[in-house]
Image (cartoon, rainbow, N blue to C red):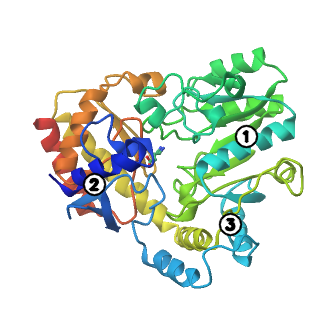
Amino acid sequence: MTKSQELFARAQKTIPGGVNSPVRAFKSVGGTPLFMERAKGAYMYDADGRRYIDYINSWGPMILGHAYEPVVKAIQEKSLGSTSFGAPTELEIEMAELIVSMAPNVDMVRMVSSGTEACMSALRLARGFTGRNKFIKFEGCYHGHADAFLVKAGSGVATFNIQTIPGVTAGVSVDTLTAPYNDIDAVEKLVAENAGQLAAIIVEPVAGNMGCIIPAPGFLEGLRAICEKEGIVLIFDEVMTGFRLAPGGAQQRLGVNADLVTYGKVIGGGMPVGAFGGKREIMQHISPSGNVYQAGTLSGNPIAMIAGYTMLRTLNDNPVIYKELDEKTEYLHKGLDKALSKGNLPFVINQLGSMISVHFSDKPVIDFSSAASANNTYFNRFFHSLLDQGIYLPPSAFETWFISAALTKEDIDETLRAVEKAVLS
Ligand code: HOZ
């Protein structure tokens, strides 16, 4: 029995399902989740001392790799001055100023503690600002686990194929309308049917919760135009893409403006952080300057702020990191193309910047239904073969892979050798 197996058996006695977030339980790919002990740079080490090349990177935030020294040092120093105040600090202003300087269309920002909180608060704000209740989200997009978003959601909800979530009442989900990703006609139809009733359209500008799905040319621009015309708040969920695809996130990289933007784990450099921000005329409706209530003792927590600030500052001051991330991911993309071609199953590789994923499908994967009709049984075998060879992919085809700056060409070559072996075996 491995140490991970022992720990998993023990964990299940006191933690539901043995884990604190469902996807990591390996339930859909089968087998025992690996319990991690430490990580450094591009590598994670499990409880049995095995090393893995990490393509999850804590689901995105480890853009600079694990245990990036300036971040670790900043946390150590800051914690000597207390781990929480529940009162404002100068560092929160510095963090807000840095985010505002990096992200387009963000005049003001409110810190929270997770992406879930960021999205549910941004939706409340859009509703409070417009005085309307309904909103549109896209099938297979995931905006955290607040009730209203758990309709046709991606990530774990898709991974476990949960159709109806006990506890989410009809009352809270009745105003959630859904459309297929990349389908602007479906959005136009919903908007026409619900004229004057829509508060927001929320979208992952590059979707990462049904594997990686790229917005079709004109899709985001189409949403922008509809929102402009109908007075609807356009929310970009940049929990994955923010500060990863460019210093100004997907907005900057894809050249489309949002009214509100949500951020998550990335801006905490691995600490539990989220934020939502956007145009001043909307943001000033948030309490205490307005009446849309939102609060949190841990919001702007000093340890989380210094970790995030140190990482964002590094990214802001070294734009070459983005070029290198793109180059590495393109190298991986080309290599995967070559290695997977040696197998006998059709595949699709979707990539934008340092987000990439593979679906085993013979048709383009552009939305949830095409992602769901891929051969995910084969993905699960592929996942385990790579894991056995020391390559740690997300344990679900409904998640994107993330590349870190710490990953080397040699790591990618090692990964590609493992991929070749997996598809040939
Ligand atoms: N929902 C997260 C990724 N999309 C998974 C988080 C986790 O299981 O740790």
For discs 3 and 2, the disc positioned in front in the rendered view: 2
Mark 2–mark 1 Cα distance, whole angstroms, equals 39 Å
Sequence-wise, the earlier of marks 1 and 3 is 1
Residue type indicated by callout 2:
Leu
Distance from Cα at disc 1 to Cα at disc 3: 20 Å
Q: Secondary structure at mark 3?
A: loop
Q: Foreground residue, 48 or 103?
A: 48
Residue 338 is situated, as x and y percent measured from the top left of the image, at 22, 41
- Circle 2 residues within 10 Å: few <14, some 14–19, many ≥20: some
> From this viewpoint, is residue 352 visible?
yes
Nearest the eye: 48 or 374: 48
Q: Secondary structure at mark 1?
A: helix
Marker disc for residue 123: 1
> Which of the numbered marks, if any, corresponds to residue 275?
none
Kindly report the distance in space between the C-alpha atoms of the residues bearing marks 3 and 2: 34 Å
Q: Using a 10 Å C-alpha cutoff, classify the residue at mark 1 as few (fewer than 14 neighbours), some (14 to 19) or many (20 or more).
A: many
**Quadrant position of the C terminus in the picture:** top left
Q: Is mark 2 within 8 Å of ligand 1?
A: no
In terms of image quadrants, where is residue 139? top right
Residue 343 vertical position relative to residue 414 in the rendered view, above or below: above
Which percent across, then down, holds residue 239? 57, 49
* N-term-proximal mark, 2 vs 1: 2
Residue under the point 48% across and 38% down? 209
Q: Which residue in the protein does label 3 denote?
A: 300
- Picture coordinates of residue 260 (x, y %)? 73, 46
Disc nearest the viewer among 2 and 1:
2
Image location of residue 173, percent across then percent down: 67, 26
The amino acid sitting under disc 3 is Gly
Return the residue at label 2: 7
Looking at the image, residue 25 sits to the left or right of residue 226; the answer is: left
